[in-house]
């Protein structure tokens, strides 16, 4: 097979085109996930700190009630 014929056959081969599509699609999904994570991270951290404070205050109140008996 000659070089020009091999290059023509290579240029017409589309077997890797689907792989490229999936790589681009996966990169887009990962990028979107990172954007969502970056947007919501501050609110999630604040909410978890509030929950931890509520749990600690509830435990402190329960301990105070049990020691008063």
Image (cartoon, helix red, strand yellow):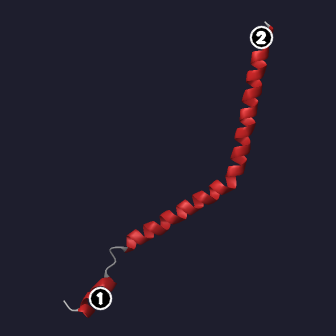
Q: Position of residue 35 (x, y in %)?
A: 63, 60
Q: Quadrant of the C terminus?
A: top right
Question: What SS does tag 2 mark?
Answer: helix
Determine whether, in the image, residue 38 is placed left or right of residue 11.
right
Residue 44, image x, y percentages: 69, 45
Residue 26 circle label? none
- Residue situated furthest left in the rendering: 1
Q: Residue at x 25, y 87 (%)?
A: 6
Place of residue 68 in the rendered image (x, y in percent of width and height, measured from the top left): 81, 9
Where, by quadrant of the figure, is residue 32 drawn? bottom right
Residue 7: assigned label: 1
Q: Name the residue rendered at 39%, 69% in the picture.
A: 19
Which of the 4 quarters of the picture holds residue 65? top right
| Residue under the point 75% across and 30% down | 54
Between 41 and 19, the one lying in front of the other is 41
Q: Residues within 10 Å of mark 1 (few under 14, many from 20)?
A: few
SS under mark 1 = helix
Viewport quadrant of the N terminus: bottom left
Q: Where 14 falls versus 31 (above or below)? A: below
Crowd class of label 2 (few under 14; some 14 to 19; many from 20; radius 10 Å): few
Horizontal side of residue 62 vs 17, given as left or right? right
Cα separation between marks 1 and 2: 86 Å
Give above or below for 45 relative to 15: above
Horizontal side of residue 13 vs 57, given as left or right: left
Q: Which residue is mark 2?
A: 67
Q: Quadrant of residue 9?
A: bottom left
At x 54%, y 60%, the residue is 30
Query: What x and y, as percent, mark residue 28?
Result: 54, 65
């Amino acid at each position: 097979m000659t070089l020009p014929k091999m290059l023509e056959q290579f240029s017409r081969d589309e077997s890797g085109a689907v792989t490229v599509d999936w790589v681009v699609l996966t990169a887009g999904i990962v990028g979107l996930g990172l954007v969502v994570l970056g947007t919501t991270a501050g609110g999630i951290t604040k909410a978890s700190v509030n929950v931890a404070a509520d749990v600690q205050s509830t435990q402190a109140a329960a301990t105070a009630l049990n020691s008063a008996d």
